Image (spheres, coloured by chain):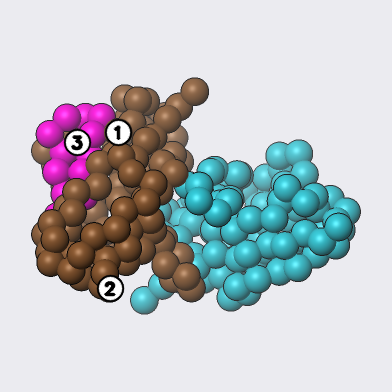
Chain colours: A brown, B cyan
Amino acid sequence: DVKVTQSSRYLVKRTGEKVFLECVQDMDHENMFWYRQDPGLGLRLIYFSYDVKMKEKGDIPEGYSVSREKKERFSLILESASTNQTSMYLCASSPGRGTGNYNEQFFGPGTRLTVL
Amino acid sequence: DQQVKQNSPSLSVQEGRISILNCDYTNSMFDYFLWYKKYPAEGPTFLISISSIKDKNEDGRFTVFLNKSAKHLSLHIVPSQPGDSAVYFCAASDRYDYKLSFGAGTTVTVRA
């Protein structure tokens, strides 16, 4: 069974802390994505990666960075957490072109981050 | 500016009746559309998709209709069941992109 796992289900951090959110997929997918979900706004793309060490900004990258050192792992970093980054964070992965339906993304369970 | 819009934030339907969820898009380059279902405290799961070369796709109780000229798609659930109570997200992409654009979601509540 395909799986995307996220390191924490719930996280509480203080303003100014550096926060790491980890995501691992076991499907050998090329593409990985980080979204945040907020009420009334749906899922908004923060960053995505289409290959190891490659990354591209999504719609709302400000205040975030990412790291992809291995194909199966994609990390989201909040350099200095702020209260407006309190949200549900969702990681997803999808196959590359020619290896499957690259439009269909598989999601992890999410991390509910609260910044106090 | 949101390119995919779900204008109804919520929908309440009687068990056994039809649920109709609507989605509009503005980007004419979009040619692939998906619906995802999300339960609280879980990630979204893929439900059904449709390519722009079709106007209908059916999978069991779920049917998606696409009207390209109106840039509109809809998801029909027949018959609705209590387990269908969830948030439904519409998403779209174009063939040149890995990214999906999501709508804001519609919360469906199926009443017994």
Q: Chain of mark 1?
A: A
The reply to whether dot 3 and dot 2 touch (C-beta < 8 Å) is no
CA neighbours of label 1 inside 10 A, class few (<14), some (14 to 19), many (20+): many
Q: Chain of mark 2?
A: A
Foreground: disc 1 or disc 3: 1
Local SS, label 2: helix
Type of amino acid at the residue the image marks with label 3: Asp
Q: Decide whether the magenta segment is chiefly helix, strand or loop.
A: strand
User: Residue under circle 3?
Assistant: A51
- Residue at 31 percent across and 53 percent down: it is A11
Residue A4: percent from the left, percent from the top?
39, 35
- Residue at 39 percent across and 46 percent down: it is A9
User: Residue under circle 1?
Assistant: A24
Residue B35: percent from the left, percent from the top?
57, 52
B93, above or below A1, in the image: below
Residue B7: percent from the left, percent from the top?
58, 75
In primary-sequence order, the first of circles 1 and 3 is 1
User: B41 or A93: which is nearer to us?
Assistant: B41
Q: Does residue B33 appear anywhere in the picture?
A: no
- Residue at 27 percent across and 66 percent down: it is A115
In primary-sequence order, the first of circles 1 and 2 is 1
The stretch in magenta equals: A65-76
What number is the disc on residue A84? Answer: 2
Of the 4 image quadrants, the one containing the N terminus of chain B is bottom left
Is residue B80 left or right of B96 when viewed as pictured? right
Of the 4 image quadrants, the one containing the C terminus of chain B is bottom right
Q: Chain of mark 3?
A: A
Type of amino acid at the residue the image marks with label 2: Asn
Local SS, label 3: loop
Foreground: disc 1 or disc 2: 2
Q: Quadrant of residue B15?
A: bottom right
